[in-house]
Amino acid sequence: MAITAAMILAAGKGTRMKSNLVKVLHELLGKPMLGWPLKAAREAGANRIVIVAGHQADQLQKQFPQSEEIRIALQEEQLGTGHAVSCALPQLDGLGGSVLILCGDTPLLTGETLRKLAAEHAASTAAVTVLTARMEKPFGYGRIVRDSEGHVRRIVEQKDAAPEEHAIDEVNSGIYCMDIDFLRAHIGRLGSENAQNEYYLTDLVGIAVAEHAGCAAMIVDDSDEILGVNDREQLALAATQLRRRINRNHLLSGVTLIDPERAYIDAEVKIGSDTVIWPGSVLRGKTVIGSACLIESNVQITDCAIADRVHIKTGSVLSESEIDEEVAIGPMAHLRPGSVLKSHVKIGNFVETKKIVMGEGSKASHLTYLGDAEIGSEVNIGCGTITCNYDGKKKHKTVIGDGVFVGSDVQLVAPVTVGANVLIAAGTTVTQDIPADSLAISRTPQVNKVGWCLKKRD
Ligand code: UD1
Ligand code: CA
């Protein structure tokens, strides 16, 4: 039977993170931690996912808005995992079958494992199937207590465990598949007489056994998958593992990562084959990169669309920009939001752009600011050119026609329009529109006072 429902418990604050931000909203590879178990639940086929929120529920809901698929259940007071599930249950009214129960702080869990868990649950008659793992260092986790025949009897929490139970190396992942009707019938029976005075979801295992409803366990193949993130050390560990998975996929699909341990690529980023990425580069958000591109070291790209055979040199920072084929950028260039570069454009070192369109084959090779500008094709922007786009209150536009040659150290005081094939002499401050095919020059004539320095020295 196909799973349709899932719950993700995410109401806790995450005290050990020592953060103002609730734990499950900490970022991991471009998405909030909670986005990872959510993705796994979707991959396992869940189409009704109840998120139990408590601390910073408003913020959580902003990032995970309610929909036909996603429901937010509020747990005002965090009285334990069992209580959290009882808060979520009303959102599944009318649904039968089984529900996957996940925690918001296990980002390494895969959809594949969840699917297997659901399949095992469906194949058995047990009301509860718990995902477990063997761990060399089980400290902190709930332990799986089995009888002499190996059947699961109950789960005991670290803080409640007897000394001989501390030796058990099979732990509870906190991930389950349960019959919804069983949950509805028995969730009210949980008590809070334990070391933490909490309603433990884990006690449902003992209840299932006592009621002869059955409890099965599935041991996860890779115990790394159930890593719970409780502090920043575990957050970093989870990030490293996720990065390895992502980078491995890129490697296998034909991307060269010079040092796969030092390529920082967000989960949603797409990269074409034969692209080469040098160490220390950070590719963020919804960035798409074409094939046969070269991204040198320490480049940061956020939410950009980059076509094929683009070369981005060391130290460049690009955000929310569109780059056509065979463009060269950098080193140390800064493309701010709204920069659109057509094919064969060249942007050199210490060039900053913002909200511009630059036509095919145009170049700005050194030390330039281009903001709020429309630049034609085959334009040469000389070293030190500045679009003076801001008058202290408003931004104004500069329009430069095709084939224009802008000499070095030119200021274009916007709003201003330069016609096609104009030549602007070096050092000119352009304050008026220039008709096509003209030479524009504004310079104070040079005076040479011969011998003046000699006299001054005497
Ligand atoms: C829980 C399990 C433990 C298991 C471990 C795996 C219980 C009693 N214990 O312990 O057996 O080995 O997970 O990581 O279930 N939450 C709520 N509301 C609450 C309490 C918790 O939503 O009232 C959420 C938390 O935000 C978190 C998840 O439930 O995402 C797990 O809670 P946590 O306090 O971290 O449980 P553990 O002590 O790790
Ligand atoms: Ca935990």
Image (spheres, rainbow, N blue to C red):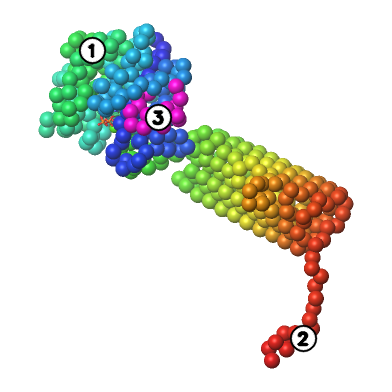
Separation of residues labelled 3 and 1 (CA atoms): 30 Å
As drawn, the label of residue 430 is none
Residue 107 or residue 449, whichever sits in front: 449
- Nearer mark to the viewer, of 1 and 2: 2
- Magenta segment boundaries in residue numbering: 51-66
Q: Earlier in the sequence, mark 3 or mark 2?
A: 3
Q: Quadrant of residue 12?
A: top left
Element under disc 2: loop
Which residue is label 3 attached to? 58
Q: Is residue 4 magenta?
A: no
**Is 152 on the left or on the right of 75, as rendered?**
left
Q: Check whether the beta carbons of the residues at disc 3 and disc 1 lie within 8 A of each other.
A: no
Farthest-out residue, left: 163
Residue type at mark 1 is His
**Is 285 on the left or on the right of 28, as rendered?**
right
Which residue is label 1 attached to? 186
Does 391 sit above or below residue 190? Answer: below
